Image (tube, helix red, strand yellow):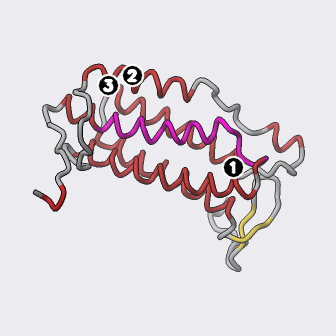
Amino acid sequence: MKIYTKGGDGGETGLFGGERVRKDAPRIMAYGEVDELNSLLGWCAVVAVGTEREKLRRTQAQLFSLGSWLATPQTAAAATRAQLPPWDASATPQLEEEIDAWEEALEPLKNFILPGGVELAARLHMARSLCRRAERAVTAFHAMDPSAVEADHLRYLNRLSDWLFVFARYVNHSAGESDVAWQANGK
């Protein structure tokens, strides 16, 4: 099977189920941002080890599931929708549990902090900001078509950005790197 089909050369793409839409449609923008986030998490995983890498891979798998849900219209045939991976309803609570566990080891935040630190933490901060962009795109798509996005998908993305932020702080803490408090005007 060839990777290129030439079907998108005119600015359209196919959804799961066969419908063709413009590549700048809100649905495409939404799952495109989720895909970009997934790619960035793969870049994070390159420098992660052990359980850190496992957590990132688990999150990538969940984002692939989310992308498939976003790419499949409600109007798709029942047989097509039956092929979607089941959404893991425990994914959001699992993020919350991990956030809570990491925060126990961290100093409470008293200021905004600058993104950065060790390499993995800096990459996680990038992923956090991209996750917010994905969340905005999915939220905009949801506003246009509320039936197209599950409420738990929105909750998951919102919690995921928090998870990435705390994960970055925890990685820095584990490496002995302190948070750098933001100072107005760089002072």
Q: Amino acid at mark 2?
A: Asp
Residue 99 falls in image quadrant: top left
Identify the residue at the far left of this view: 187
Magenta residue check for 35? no
Residue 100: assigned label: 2
Q: Quadrant of the C terminus?
A: bottom left
Rendered residue at 79%/47% (across/down): 147
**Does the stretch in magenta take in 161?**
yes
Does 92 sit left or right of 16 as displayed? left
Q: Nearer the viewer, mark 1 or mark 2?
A: 2
Label 2 neighbour load within 10 Å: few <14, some 14-19, many 20+: few
Q: Is residue 121 left or right of residue 11?
A: left
- Magenta part mainly helix, strand or loop? helix
Magenta residues (range): 147-168
Q: Residue at x 55, y 37 (%)?
A: 61
Determine whether the residue tagged by mark 3 lies in a helix, strand or loop.
helix
Res. 86 image quadrant: top right
Indicate the secondary structure of the residue bearing disc 1: helix
* Residue under label 3: 103
**Residue 140 percent location from the top left of the image:** 64, 57
Write down the residue under mark 1: 70
Quadrant for the N terminus, please. Answer: bottom right
Q: Is residue 182 left or right of residue 5?
A: left
Kindly check if marks 3 and 2 are in contact, taking CB atoms under 8 A apart as contact: yes
Spatial separation of the CA atoms under disc 3 and disc 1: 32 Å
Q: How far is the residue under mark 3 from the one under mark 2?
A: 5 Å
